[in-house]
């Protein structure tokens, strides 16, 4: 049996554009203490719904509440590389059975083997599945309002405001796989 526990990486919460006017995209976001520090602007998705500033503030408040990193760092700027993805825990299993037989006075050996990668996923489809950040740039199109304060809008996914931090990865390593083999040794 082989057990593996690891993180799939880390990321930073950033703006999807240049928020401070230095010409570089990817500026770290400020995590507001409460709704009074949020400054959203109403926008309409192309061929989609319109989201008011209040709807975005409510959605961002809910997003912060469900996110472990954001909720612990209210009133601060996000730190670069400080958001670590949830740990991935996987178990691989290998079973072997040796078979011996004397044929014409000679010892012959065979071995049956099954190797199961991500064995836990065979037992429960939720086990051994990685998680990734849906969007690390949850705030987009920063600009200034009439008072010169930073104003922005929330990221949209499938015509809805982003609601959760993580989604399951969908790769071959997220599902169980097995291989059956037989080895025969001649003597």
Image (spheres, helix red, strand yellow):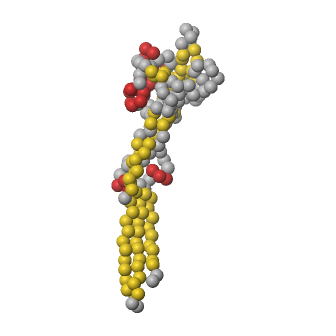
| Residue 45: x %, y % from top left | 56, 27
Horizontally, is 31 left or right of 141 in the view?
A: left
Can residue 4 be seen from the camera position used here? yes
Circle count = 0
| Residue 104: x %, y % from top left | 40, 91
Q: Is residue 168 above or below residue 36?
A: below
Can residue 55 be seen from the camera position used here? no
Residue, x 57% and y 21% (percent of image)? Answer: 19
- Quarter of the image with the N terminus is bottom left
Residue, x 54% and y 16% (percent of image)? Answer: 150
Q: Is residue 122 above or below residue 40?
A: below
- Quarter of the image with the C terminus is bottom left
Q: Residue furthest top?
A: 147
Q: Nearer the viewer, residue 119 or 87?
A: 87
Residue, x 42% and y 27% (percent of image)? Answer: 70
Horizontally, is 38 left or right of 98 in the view?
A: right
Q: Nearer the viewer, residue 6 or 18?
A: 6
Residue, x 44% and y 31% (percent of image)? Answer: 163
| Residue 110: x %, y % from top left | 41, 77
Horizontally, is 101 left or right of 139 in the view?
A: left
| Residue 105: x %, y % from top left | 39, 90
Q: Is residue 176 above or below residue 82?
A: below
């Amino acid at each position: 049996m082989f057990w593996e526990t690891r993180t799939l990486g880390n990321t930073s919460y950033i703006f999807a554009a240049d928020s401070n006017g230095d010409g570089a995209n990817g500026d770290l976001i400020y995590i507001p203490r409460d709704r009074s520090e949020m400054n959203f602007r109403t926008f309409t998705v192309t061929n989609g719904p319109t989201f008011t500033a209040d709807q975005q503030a409510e959605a961002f408040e809910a997003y912060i509440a469900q996110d472990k990193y954001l909720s612990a760092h209210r009133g601060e700027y996000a730190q670069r590389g400080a958001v670590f993805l949830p740990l991935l825990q996987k178990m691989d299993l290998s079973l072997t059975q040796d078979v011996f037989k004397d044929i014409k006075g000679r010892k012959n050996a065979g071995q049956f083997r099954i190797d199961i990668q991500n064995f836990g996923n065979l037992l429960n489809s939720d086990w051994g599945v990685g998680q990734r950040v849906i969007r690390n740039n949850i705030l987009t199109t920063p600009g200034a309002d009439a008072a010169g304060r930073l104003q922005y809008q929330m990221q949209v996914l499938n015509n809805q405001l982003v609601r959760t931090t993580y989604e399951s990865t969908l790769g071959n390593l997220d599902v169980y796989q097995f291989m059956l083999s037989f080895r025969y040794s001649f003597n």
